[in-house]
Amino acid sequence: MSELFANIRIEISEDDEIFSFEPGMSLKDGKLLGESWIYDLSIYDDKMLEGNQKADLPPEEYCYQLLCEIAEVQDYLDQGMSILYSGMPKEMDGNTYYFYDLGTDHDEHFVAEFNYAVSLDGKVLKLNILTGEWESVDLG
């Protein structure tokens, strides 16, 4: 399954029993909602976590924490912006990146103002909206 839609229900049957659930993610601040009816369908790769001092965290949570440590991101968070995990990881430049939007969270919708890609090895990229290119972010 590559996409989760709001109206999907998965049913699994075994003998006379039918198991039914509706997968989803809250994506509130890039975190999965801790409710019993929400299932974490993220794909975790143990090799990607090797050498990771926070290997007990899901990779998107670890990358979220790395992103929050960057001074410019922290400045925006202090001004009231939020971070939204924007979906499945993708390969770029031989690394797996997790994608996050930084923006304003309105009652009805989230407005992404900056786009970031974070890898487990600590590389952070920011999308230059004028050129469409991913550029390295100063981690200092």
Image (cartoon, helix red, strand yellow):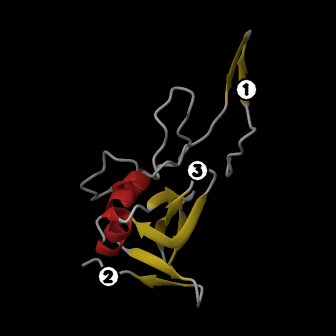
Q: Is residue 115 shown above or below 68?
A: below
Q: Tag 3: Cα neighbours inside 10 Å, few (<14), some, or many (≥20)?
A: few
Of the two numbered discs 1 and 3 on the same chain, state the one appearing first in sequence: 1
Of 122 and 71, nearer the camera is 71
How far, Cα to Cα, is label 3 from label 2? 32 Å
Kind of residue sitting beneath label 2 = Asp
Q: Is residue 92 left or right of residue 58?
A: right
Q: Which residue is mark 3?
A: 107
Check the image and name the residue furthest to the top.
16
Q: Which mark is residue 75?
A: none
Circle 3 SS class: loop
Q: Which residue is mark 2?
A: 138
Q: Is residue 128 shown above or below 29?
A: below
Kind of residue sitting beneath label 3 = Asp
Of 97 and 109, nearer the camera is 109
Check the image and name the residue furthest to the bottom.
131
Residue 6 placement (x, y as % from top left): 71, 42
Q: Is residue 72 left or right of residue 34?
A: left
Q: Is residue 121 visible?
A: no
